[in-house]
């Protein structure tokens, strides 16, 4: 099995190094990951700045760009002389559940591979700080072995509680929950008297009901959420078509 491994915390982060070690026990693994932390970069591509790739170690390279840049360049140039069997992203330092997946660079890297027709899995630990990372890496490797041969092109988002292996409960297939709106931005003044802003913390879980990723991980289960990129509100197509038919297709006059 040939795995292309990425993350958003940077190529030296403990999460990707632990996962690399576990995956390398049964697969050919190549790392192409950001040079620095690129959390919350989602699917961003660096279209206005040049991107450089440097060798860090055998089969390990870092990129002066985003997680999506890493996968985009790897899959559209001659950097690789093969098509990976699987894209793996992570292990992220903190959860990527519910609405977080829209912002996640970890998920963004996996999604970029998915867009190029390669199955992909994004892995995250629920709590920050790398607690019980060894158990998370072993669990992630087991999930890769279990699903890697699944036919088709698919995208999975996996969140693993920070627990010892013996305390992790069986995986559950989940849907994404929802969060409340994020807390307000933090306003500060720098030493030069200029106002600066920091994005505030994420809000608490709003929908953590049975079947969600929030509910599963809170109970100690590993959460596996199948994702797609179709943002169409299919249930509302008929409603909006009716409104369009009532008002006519001509644009409203100012």
Image: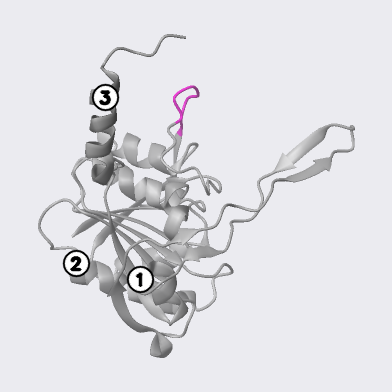
Instruction: From the top left corner, tell me how far across and down residue 16 is, in percent.
Output: 44, 60
**Which residue range is magenta in the image?**
46-52
Q: In which quadrant of the rendered view does residue 221 lie?
A: bottom left
Q: Which residue is mark 3?
A: 246
Q: Which residue is mark 1?
A: 223
Real-space Cα distance between discs 1 and 2? 14 Å
Q: Residue furthest top?
A: 253
Q: Residue at x 52, y 59 (%)?
A: 13
Label 1 or label 2, whichever comes before in sequence order: 2
Q: Badge 2, how many Cα within 10 Å: few under 14, some, many 20+?
A: few
In terms of secondary structure, where does tag 1 sit?
strand
Real-space Cα distance between discs 3 and 2? 48 Å
Which of the two marks, 3 or 2, is nearer to us in this view? 3
Residue 56 is at least partly visible in this image = no
Instruction: From the top left corner, tell me how far across and down residue 247 is, in percent.
Output: 30, 21
In the picture, measured across the screen, residue 170 lies left or right of residue 132, that is: left
Q: Residue furthest left?
A: 151
Instruction: From the top left corner, tell me how far across and down residue 194 is, in percent.
Output: 84, 31
Q: Which residue is mark 2?
A: 147
Q: Is residue 21 above or below residue 66?
A: below
Label 3 or label 2, whichever comes before in sequence order: 2
In terms of secondary structure, where does tag 2 sit?
helix
In the picture, measured across the screen, residue 8 lies left or right of residue 171, that is: right
* Main SS of residues in magenta: loop
Label 3 or label 1, whichever comes before in sequence order: 1
Q: Are marks 1 and 2 in contact (CB under 8 Å)?
A: no
Q: Are marks 3 and 2 in contact (CB under 8 Å)?
A: no
Which of the two marks, 3 or 1, is nearer to us in this view? 3
Give the image's coloring scheme: one colour
């Amino acid at each position: 099995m040939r795995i292309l491994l990425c993350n958003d915390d940077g190529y030296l982060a403990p999460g990707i190094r632990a996962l690399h070690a576990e995956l390398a026990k049964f697969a050919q693994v190549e790392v192409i990951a950001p040079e620095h932390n690129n959390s919350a970069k989602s699917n961003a591509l660096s279209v206005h700045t040049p991107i450089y790739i440097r060798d860090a170690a055998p089969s390990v390279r870092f990129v002066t760009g985003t997680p999506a840049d890493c996968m985009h360049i790897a899959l559209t140039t001659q950097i690789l002389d093969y098509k990976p069997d699987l894209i793996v992203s992570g292990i992220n330092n903190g959860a990527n559940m519910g609405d977080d997946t829209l912002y996640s660079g970890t998920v963004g890297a996996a999604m970029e591979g998915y867009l190029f027709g390669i199955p992909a899995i994004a892995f995250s630990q629920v709590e920050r700080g790398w607690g019980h990372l060894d158990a998370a890496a072993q669990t992630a490797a087991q999930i890769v072995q279990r699903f890697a041969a699944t036919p088709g092109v698919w995208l999975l988002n996996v969140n693993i509680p920070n627990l010892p292996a013996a305390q992790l409960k069986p995986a559950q297939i989940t849907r994404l929950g929802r969060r409340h709106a994020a807390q307000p931005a933090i306003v500060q003044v720098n030493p030069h008297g200029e106002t600066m802003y920091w994005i505030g913390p994420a809000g608490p879980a709003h929908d953590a009901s049975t079947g969600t990723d929030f509910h599963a991980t809170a109970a100690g289960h590993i959460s596996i959420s199948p994702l797609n990129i179709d943002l169409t509100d299919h249930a509302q197509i008929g409603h909006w078509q009716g409104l369009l038919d009532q008002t006519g297709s001509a644009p409203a006059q100012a």
